[in-house]
Image: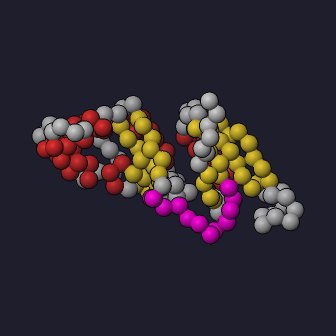
Amino acid sequence: MTTRITPNLWFDGNAEEAAEFYVSVFKDARITGKTHYPAGSPGTKGSVMTVSWELDGHKFVGINGGPQFKFNEAISFEVHCADQAEVDFYWERLTADGGKEGPCGWCTDRFGVSWQVVPAGMDELFADGDEERAARAFRAMESMTKLDVAALRRAADGEAVAA
């Protein structure tokens, strides 16, 4: 089946650098193509107009569109992690070199793109059924930047969570 929807990300002249960064972070990733601005276009002739890449089989395109638009948290990419080691791996890399930690497992990379780094088992903590358990897990999550799945489970189970 062909992917019919591809996220396009607007960069201020550094789409190629961003694509190279993303393919260095994710294990199953590669740059798949580039286009260049032709003469008479808004960009400098021969400079990179778009760069295409894949992360874990998902296609992305970055366009060097200029300073008109900035990223914000209204759009984010969720990284599903198998365990705490993967959470730590992605969190460390996505927040490196100018990235920023945010609340509740959200972070912003150095290009301003927002990510949610989520450990396996999060859904079960907030699943319908035990509202008190979910409330305890939620309160614990609100006190975190990078998520700690063991601490979230302890909180859900009613155990104290160290601040």
| Residue, far right | 39
Q: Nearer the viewer, residue 1 or 56?
A: 1
> How many badges with numbers are in the image?
0
Taking the spot 44% from the left edge, 44% from the top edge, the residue there is 78
Magenta stretch bounds = 63-74
User: Is 107 part of what is drawn in magenta?
Assistant: no
**98 left or right, relative to 62:** left
- Residue 28's place in the image compared with 74, above or below, is above
For the N terminus, the image quarter is top right
Which residue is located at x 34 percent, y 55 percent?
103
Between 80 and 2, the one lying in front of the other is 2
Q: How is the model colour-coded?
A: secondary structure
98 relative to 157 in the view: left or right: right
Residue 11 percent coordinates (x, y): 63, 59
Seen at 76% across and 54% down, the residue is 48
Q: Is residue 88 above or below residue 101?
A: above
